Amino acid sequence: MKSSELKKLLNETLAQNKSDYNDFSLIREALKSIDGQSFTTKRLEKALNPIGFNFRIHCGMYYVSREKDDKRYNDHLVGYQTNPVINAEKVADFDSWANAGALSRVNQCEYWLEENNFKELLAVYTKLEKAYKSVKDALNEIEGNKMGSFHVPVHYDLLRIAGIEPSVASEIRRGK
């Protein structure tokens, strides 16, 4: 694994989670202006549309989302039909994925981007990548040398002894 690939992945994840948390904060602030009132489409759209969010009801739950590239992007759960009163503070519990979860992922990404931690993470995943390639090569060699299940009656048992489920072995061979 290349250092640049890992760094890019961590930075993209960091940026995405910061964005998710920012969206959550904007939604909670917008809901504070209508706190204690009942959920109505008109009321929520009036509060949320100016900051770029839409409201919808699905399966008895109230969601707020932002449109991005003509697709709904990051649904934020803001309430339930069983409790039709807006409670801006409870949104933190309802939408913990974009609240506490996003903050946790931000902290984790920042931790792994620190130089010593980054080197450790890179080393482990590079080792994993090499091990995966070795397993894939060995499985392809088994098939290429007629040592698979058709030619070796205990093939599946041998895979299991090696710690590889037969269904996973075929996926690894195909590169999945």
Image (spheres, grey):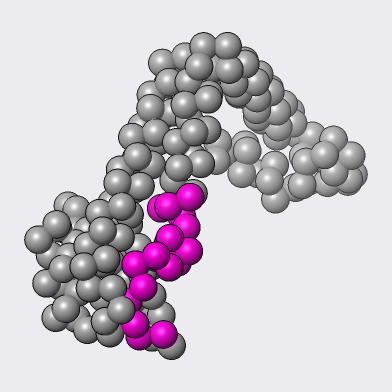
The correct choice, above or below, for 118 with respect to 68 in the image is above
Task: Specify the principal SS of the magenta part.
Answer: loop
**Rendered view: 115 above or below 69:** above
- Viewer can see residue 144: no
Based on the displayed image, in which of its 4 quarters is residue 19 positioned?
Answer: top left
Q: Is residue 122 left or right of residue 3?
A: right
Q: Is residue 164 visible?
A: yes
**Residue lying at 26% horizontally and 67% vertically, measured from the top left:** 31
Above or below for 54 versus 6? below
Q: Is residue 82 above or below residue 9?
A: below
Q: Is residue 115 left or right of residue 26?
A: right
Does residue 92 belong to the magenta stretch? yes
Residue furthest out toward the bottom: 82
Q: Does 155 appear in magenta? A: no
Residue in front for this viewpoint, 63 or 147: 63
Residue 64 on image: x %, y %:
28, 66
Find residue 24 and report its horizontal and vertical position in percent.
33, 54
Q: Is residue 90 left or right of residue 65?
A: right
Residue drawn where x is 82% and y is 39% of the image: 163
Q: Position of residue 115 (x, y in %)?
A: 51, 11
Q: Which residues are magenta?
A: 83-100
Seen at 35% across and 47% down, the residue is 21
Seen at 49% across and 33% down, the residue is: 107
